[in-house]
Amino acid sequence: MAADVRVILAGLWAAVMLTYLLGDVLRLMAGDATPGLLGGREATQAMWLLIAAIMLVPIVMLVASLTLPYPLVGWINIGVAALVVVFNLVALPYPGLYDNVLIVVSFVFNGLTAWYAWTWLSAAA
């Protein structure tokens, strides 16, 4: 059972990452973002580094879900999923309906991540 939950958690983090990337692509295609600009001003290297770090969270969590020891992996999944939701709530609403829908979809994926991790931890108790 433990390996199954690890794969599910990793898959959910992959889904979150792809949802974010889909939003970025649609934002560019819809003309809601200008390459090189963030909030209407030229982005600095520090800003790009911060964005890269934020976008690495689902990738790191995918790997962590497959490699970290139990029960640590469950607690980290719950905590990071909650933090990601809070982080994204701060930016709502986005100008595009598609962006708001995709963020809600990512909330569902994060909710499922926390639920699977919690269920896994509870089953062993």
Image: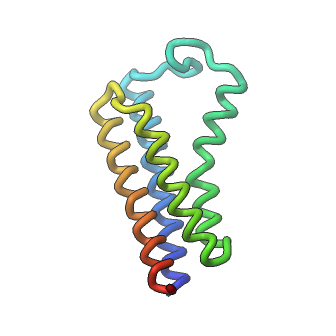
Q: Residue at x 53, y 83 (%)?
A: 2
- Picture mark count: 0
Please, which residue is most extreme toward the left here? Answer: 97
Could you tell me residue 113's position as x and y percent? 45, 64
Residue at point 63%, 71% (across, down): 72
Does 7 sit left or right of 19 as displayed?
Answer: right
Task: Say which of 85 and 44 sits in front.
Answer: 85
- To which quarter of the image does residue 112 belong? bottom left
Position in image of residue 36 (x %, y %)? 59, 20
Question: Furthest-top residue in view?
Answer: 41
Q: At which x and y percent is residue 85?
A: 44, 47
Res. 44 image quadrant: top right
Outermost residue, right direction? 45
> Residue sitting at 34 percent across and 50 percent down?
105
Residue 43 vs residue 97: left or right?
right
- Vertical comparison of 125 with 88: above or below: below
Picture layout, residue 78 above or below residue 17: below
- For residue 67, above or below residue 2: above
Q: Position of residue 53 (x, y in %)?
A: 65, 41
Instruction: Out of 82 and 18, give the one closest to the viewer.
Output: 82
Residue at the location (49% across, 19% down)? 34
In this rendering, position of residue 104 left or right of residue 56: left
